Amino acid sequence: MKALVAIDMALHRGLTDGTALPCAGTRRLRALAALAAPAESPMETRLRWLLIDAGLSRPEVQKDLRDGDGRFVGRADLYYPAARLVIEYDGGNHRDRLVEDNRRQNLLVNAGFRLLRFTAADIYHRPDVVVAQVRQVQNGRNPSREVRGLRKTRGIHRRNAG
């Protein structure tokens, strides 16, 4: 995972364009190079790998999104075009950007995109829920209604007792 994070960061920062990566080194490095994308943070890489490792297709990374009139409405950390699904990683500085993120979220939703947001706690402690929610959106279902083993009660998710 550390190697994939390092390659993603090098791509994002423009330290390489990735053309030499498939030729370099061992078979493992070539396999990692095939998965690399210019993620803006290590946690975005971890989130992307969680989805790929669970058997989901590779999402587009750092995808510029436009509304029906061609106006820029935001850049997705991860994007599944067939489902119009935007996936965002909310990092530690997310609270500082809350107003900006809320405005962007409204633009995305009004432009017809679906949006899921995840934190480090989700990725590390609830990876099954992350994968289930992404799968549900890809299958045309609403993940806020039911995630395997969870039900929504008074605005929070609680484990089913039975």
Image: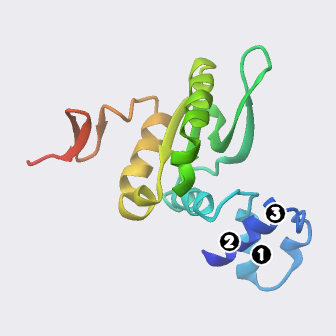
Q: Is 3 displayed left or right of 89 in the figure? A: right
Q: Which residue is mark 3?
A: 11
Mark 2, mark 1: which one is toward the viewer?
2
Residue 3 screen position, x and y as percent: 68, 77
Real-space CA distance between mark 1 and mark 3, rounded to the nearest whole angstrom:
15 Å
Q: Residue at x 59, y 18 (%)?
A: 110
Which residue is outermost to the bottom?
26
Q: Quadrant of residue 79?
A: top right
Q: Amino acid at mark 2?
A: Leu
User: Which residue is the site of mark 1?
Assistant: 30
Where residue 21 sits, quadrant-wise, is bottom right
Question: How far apart in space, not on screen, are marks 2 and 3 (Cα)?
Answer: 11 Å
Which of the two residues, 162 or 97, is positioned nearer the viewer here?
97
Look at 41% across and 43% down and name the residue there: 133
Task: Identify the residue at image location x=39%, y=30%.
Answer: 142
| Left or right, 143 with reference to 35 | left
Residue matched to label 2: 4
Count residues near mark 3 (Cα–Cα under 10 Å), then give few for <14, some for 14-19, many for 20+: some
Residue 89 visible somewhere in the drawing: no
